[in-house]
Image: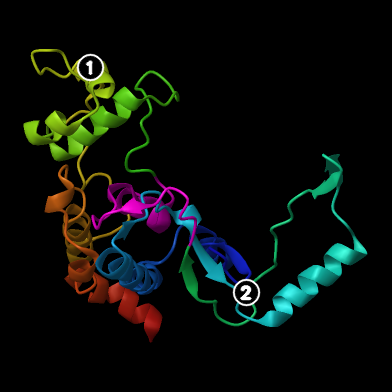
């Protein structure tokens, strides 16, 4: 799949705006576009992206002059390069400078891991916390340090969602299942399950009041163990959180 030149991932927009993460009003507008695109993929193409994350949501260039100036600067000061199999490989320079006027269109990219189906992606929803405040909902880090493990990641999911239903475990790959569960069906790593303070509310301190309540309800519609129980992109497009404006949002718009 080929795209026109694209600027950078959506998460970098916060840097241009001078904010930590994206303001909710801005993210909501982009989410509407993403959900519209996902509905088309699911309903018309019957494709699940499977690797939908903030790095794969790319903004287009807001003006052609940005590309022209970038090319001119590369010619004037070429990046370092090395030769591989007789061809030069240049060091990446992804800095296109500040935004000049608005932003370009948002595109869903990187379909290399796509499969046929129509379920809403679980992990994309978990990354909303990163887009809003640059914090991770499920980082998979073990309590004793900063080392990631699949067991800790799964334990965090249990802490938020409760134990997975037997129906899901019955579908699991035997090797994966045996690394997590005993033959009696007991989770092997209960010590990794977070405390009762590990809740959606405590993990969302950056939103308040009705905005927070609606956001958690929005995310909870997708953060479900069974794919068939997750709300579709078509349904989520009309979710109340996406149209809600807090008092802070209204003041910033005035």
Q: Residue furthest right?
A: 76
Establish if 171 lies above or below 179: below
Q: Give the numbered dot on residue 35.
A: none
Tell me the CA gap for discs 1 and 2: 50 Å
Q: Is residue 20 visible?
A: no
* Mark 2, residue position: 99
Image location of residue 97, percent across then percent down:
70, 67
Establish if 208 lies above or below 26: above
Q: Is residue 114 visible?
A: yes
* Mark 1, residue position: 178
Residue at point 69%, 81% (across, down): 64
Callout 2: helix, strand or loop? loop
| Contact (Cβ within 8 Å) of mark 1 with mark 2 | no
On screen, residue 6 versus residue 135, left or right, reads right
Which mark is nearer the camera, 1 or 2?
A: 1
111 falls in the magenta region = yes
Q: Which of the pair 15/116 is nearer the observer?
A: 116
The residues colored magenta run: 109-135
50 falls in the magenta region = no
Image location of residue 214, percent across then percent down:
18, 63
């Amino acid at each position: 799949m080929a795209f026109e030149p694209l600027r950078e991932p959506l998460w970098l927009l916060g840097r241009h705006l001078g904010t930590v993460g994206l303001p909710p009003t801005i993210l909501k507008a982009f989410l509407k576009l993403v959900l519209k695109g996902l509905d088309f993929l699911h309903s018309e193409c019957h494709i699940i992206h499977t690797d939908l994350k903030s790095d794969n949501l790319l903004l287009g260039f807001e003006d052609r002059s940005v590309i022209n100036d970038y090319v001119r600067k590369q010619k004037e000061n070429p990046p370092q390069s090395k030769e591989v199999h007789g061809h030069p490989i240049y060091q990446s320079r992804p800095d296109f400078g500040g935004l000049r006027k608005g932003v370009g269109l948002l595109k869903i990219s990187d379909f290399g891991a796509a499969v046929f189906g129509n379920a809403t992606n679980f992990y994309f929803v978990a990354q909303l916390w990163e887009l809003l405040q640059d914090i991770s909902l499920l980082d998979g880090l073990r309590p004793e340090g900063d080392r990631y493990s699949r067991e800790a990641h799964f334990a965090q999911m249990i802490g938020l969602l409760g134990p997975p239903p037997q129906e899901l475990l019955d579908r699991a790959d035997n090797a994966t299942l045996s690394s997590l569960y005993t033959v009696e069906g007991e989770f092997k790593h209960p010590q990794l399950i977070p405390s009762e303070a590990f809740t959606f509310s405590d993990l969302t301190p950056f939103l308040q009041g009705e905005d927070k309540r609606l956001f958690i309800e929005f995310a909870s519609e997708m953060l479900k163990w069974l794919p068939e129980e997750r709300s579709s992109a078509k349904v989520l497009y009309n979710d109340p959180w996406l149209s809600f404006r807090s008092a802070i949002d209204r003041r910033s718009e005035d």
